Image: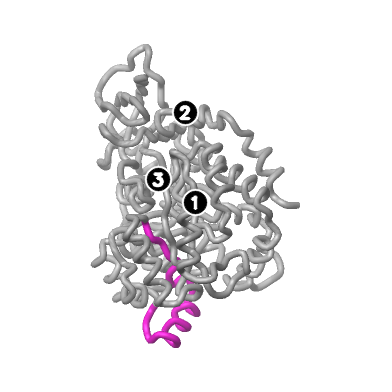
Amino acid sequence: MRTSFWCELAWLGDAEPASGVMVDVEGGVIAGVMFGVERPADARLLPGLTLPGLANAHSHAFQRALRGRTHRGGEGSFWTWREQMYELAGLLSSDDVYALARATFAEMALAGITVVGEFDYLHESEAIIAAAAEAGVRLTLIDACYLDGGLPRFRDESPSAWAERVAGIELGPDARLGAAIHSVRAVDPDSARIVAEAAAAHEWPLHAHVSEQPAENEECFRRYGATPLELLDRVGALSPWFTAVHATHVTESDAQLLWNAGAFCCVCPTTERDLADGIGEPSGRLTLGSDSQAVIDLFEEARAVELDIRLATGVRGRLQAVELARAATIDGYESLGWPEGGRIEPGALADLVAVRLDTTRLSGTRPADALDAVIFAATAGDVDTVIVGGREVVRDGRHLTIDVASELADAIPQ
């Protein structure tokens, strides 16, 4: 069945959007794109600015339950927050994880996110896969090898036990598999090499938490005489399919390792500022994540990368709206193993998000400035329509199958 969407404006990759863009969809894929055309009577209207669907490249869905609960009590740090996260993780049953993930993924859909990379160390793959399918978003289940520290439920006995467990995961049609070395704190070098080799053999994306805290770097150097990225490079983890998550405290040589490998760097500014991680300048191909769900808003994540750099350097304009839009779409999709997504062109996945330009935040926007206005001023609340595989998931700012606020209230432990 062929469906046509007519976009008032659409971002096709340039600094200025195109107007009057017709997007024809067949079999969940974009079959044709025309611009500068009048709206046909049978075409569905996408108001405002239409972008490719947004890619949330790093998520821990269960941490949505921590929002607003970790801020009292005086001074704190990443490490004190981690203890609160451990306490939550120890309480959740499989049913709890499913309910939280379903509601959180639906909140992501409302924010224009059409694919999510769930970095899973709870090892609740069945619950997470089902939750994403019911929320209507694509999923890359990034299953984390975690051998040392943390809670018992996080840990595999060995890298071979991890590989055996991952081999048994059953995926749905809109889910793909990825691998993760949780961190160099949790996975020793020999085991990290095995995980990296497995990811390469299966052509899975490979992600790892890297240099989020100075203490992590100091411990790694004390034990191995190397930074986390140098260690991961030694074991063969770095490649065009590798994503360093956070990389808040990397050295110049670390950054060069990522660039030389053609790897990605996933920055999660709303989490990194919430946890006082620091401001990191992206190294490698930039992607974005909501991580701890302190906020679920990829427009905020995108602009925060540039705005945080401005605060740190006193210089404006290091990253332009086009670069930030690519991070939120095409590069995010590729980092999650969906290279056919994140763009509006024939042959691409028909994943689209329409952002209204007549809201309080965006009214008065000139068409030529629409991309800049959306990246630097829009919020998740300005999303009007979300389409995944040619099927509407969100219309008029409402999820079509899930009462998101109600399900969040029911899913979050009181």
Q: Of all residues shown, which one is farthest toward the right?
A: 414
Which residue in the protein does label 1 denote? 169
Question: In the rendered structure, which amino acid carries the disc numbered 3?
Answer: Ile
Question: In the rendered structure, which amino acid carries the disc numbered 2?
Answer: Glu
User: Quadrant of residue 231 in the image?
Assistant: bottom left
In the figure, is residue 335 to the left or right of 379? Answer: left
Name the residue located 54 percent from the left edge and 70 percent from the top edge: 157
User: Quadrant of residue 340 in the image?
Assistant: top left
Which residue in the protein does label 2 denote? 392
**Image marks 3 and 1: residues in contact by CB distance under 8 Å:** no
Q: Is residue 401 visible?
A: yes
Gap between marks 3 and 2, in whole Å? 23 Å
Q: Taking 40 as reference, is 353 above or below it?
A: below
Give the image location of residue 273, x and y in percent: 52, 63
In the figure, is residue 319 to the left or right of 172? Answer: left
**Magenta residues, start to end:** 205-227
Question: In the rendered structure, which amino acid carries the disc numbered 1?
Answer: Ile
Which residue in the protein does label 3 denote? 375
Q: Which of marks 2 and 1 is in front?
A: 1
In the figure, is residue 81 to the left or right of 386? Answer: right
Mark closest to the chain's N terminus, 3 or 2:
3
Gap between marks 3 and 1, in whole Å? 37 Å
Gap between marks 2 and 1, in whole Å? 28 Å
Q: Total of numbered circles in the picture?
A: 3
* Mark 2 element type: strand
User: Quadrant of residue 316 in the image?
Assistant: bottom left
Camera-side residue of 126 and 116: 126
Q: In which quarter of the image is the N terminus?
A: top left
Camera-side residue of 412 and 80: 412
